[in-house]
Amino acid sequence: MNIIKDLFLAIAILMLSSSSPENQRTIAGQKDDLKGPVKEVKEYVAIQRDSILCKDYLAFFTCYDEDGNRIKRCGYSNDGSLTFKQIIKYNRDGNERLDSVFLGPEWEVSKSYFKYNNDRTESEQFVYLNNSPILRIIKKYDENGKIIESIELRSDGKCDVYNYNNKYDDNGNKIEYSQVFNGKPQWKNTYKYDVDGYKTEYCSYNSDGCLFMKHTYKYDDKGQNIEENAYTPNDSLYYTKKFSYDNDGNQIEICEYNADGSLDHKESYKYDRYGNVSSKVTASNTGIMTEGVVYEYVYY
């Protein structure tokens, strides 16, 4: 396969996956983090006119069934042309994905079929490109339903094996998570928690075992994350994020500060009556909007 096809395949597999390895348990169905009986979501790139946030063009359109499973997602460019289309089908009870079709660059079609274990964890995924089989993914889990191995068998005869290792403390908190690729360590994440079970530290390490980045977290008396600090390998402060919430616990503002304490940028959020994000605005340290998004929902 050429570079374009390899890139297309990687994007397609990412969109067809119901969860990342970090989430471990690959449950049937593909759900998004939405509240209420969402039927459709339109995501618009927005601009400001006279300090008013206005829709510019439709960027994404997503549909869900009554169980909250994603059944269609389309992406559009700023001229209104379609850039990709994903369609997902489920079995009769809506629990298991039967197949998923992804149309992308040059209108190549990537299609996946899925098989499941008795506990509804995904056991196999078969990927086709323009009706030709190109990849088979086999997943294995431990007794707790955490993925420990993913084997990718390509049509060209290449086999890649990913091993995932998990460690937990006596309270069931994950304290270490690492990946081994074809027998070689790739990366490792470690976690620390306070007495209430809130994550207080997250460290990521490179394949050579050297620290890449450290994050620390602070919480208010409601258990809401109010501050995150990121540090470089030499323990120098890289950035600080501070979070604000409304009375319903919705995150309404994220301010990111540089190591010297100066504001780098700010993100502001608004929500609809169900608690789904209705708009997101990113502004520079001078208050000028650099990115805006407006979301419109249709509910069942």
Image (cartoon, rainbow, N blue to C red):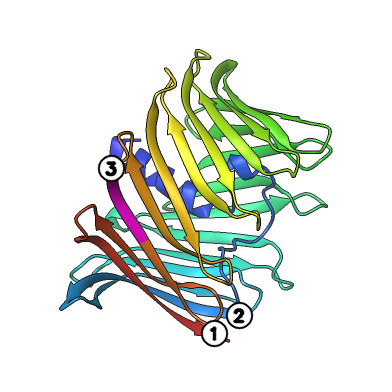
Residue 221 rendering spot, x and y as whole percentages = 65, 55
Q: Is residue 245 above or below residue 177?
A: below
Residue 119 rendering spot, x and y as whole percentages = 81, 52
Q: Secondary structure at mark 1?
A: strand
Which residue occupies the foreground of this view, 242 or 170? 242
Could you give the CA–CA distance between mark 1 and mark 3, rounded to whole angstroms?
41 Å
Looking at the rendering, the stretch of residues picked out in magenta corresponds to 262-267
Q: Is residue 213 left or right of residue 56?
A: right
- Is residue 49 shown in magenta? no
Q: Secondary structure at mark 2?
A: loop
Judging by the rendered image, the residue that carries numbered circle 2 is 37
The quarter of the rendered structure image containing the C terminus is bottom right
The answer, for residue 53, to whether it is visible in the render is yes
The kind of residue on which mark 1 rests is Tyr
Contact, mark 1 vs mark 2 (Cβ under 8 Å): yes
Residue at the (55%, 68%) spot, across then down: 70
Judging by the rendered image, the residue that carries numbered circle 1 is 299
Contact, mark 2 vs mark 3 (Cβ under 8 Å): no
The answer, for residue 132, to whether it is visible in the render is no
Q: Residues within 10 Å of mark 2 (few under 14, many from 20)?
A: some
Judging by the rendered image, the residue that carries numbered circle 3 is 262
Could you give the CA–CA distance between mark 2 and mark 3, rounded to whole angstroms?
41 Å
Q: Nearer the viewer, mark 1 or mark 3?
A: 3
The kind of residue on which mark 3 rests is Ser
Which residue occupies the foreground of this view, 300 or 105? 300
Could you give the CA–CA distance between mark 1 and mark 2, rounded to whole angstroms?
5 Å
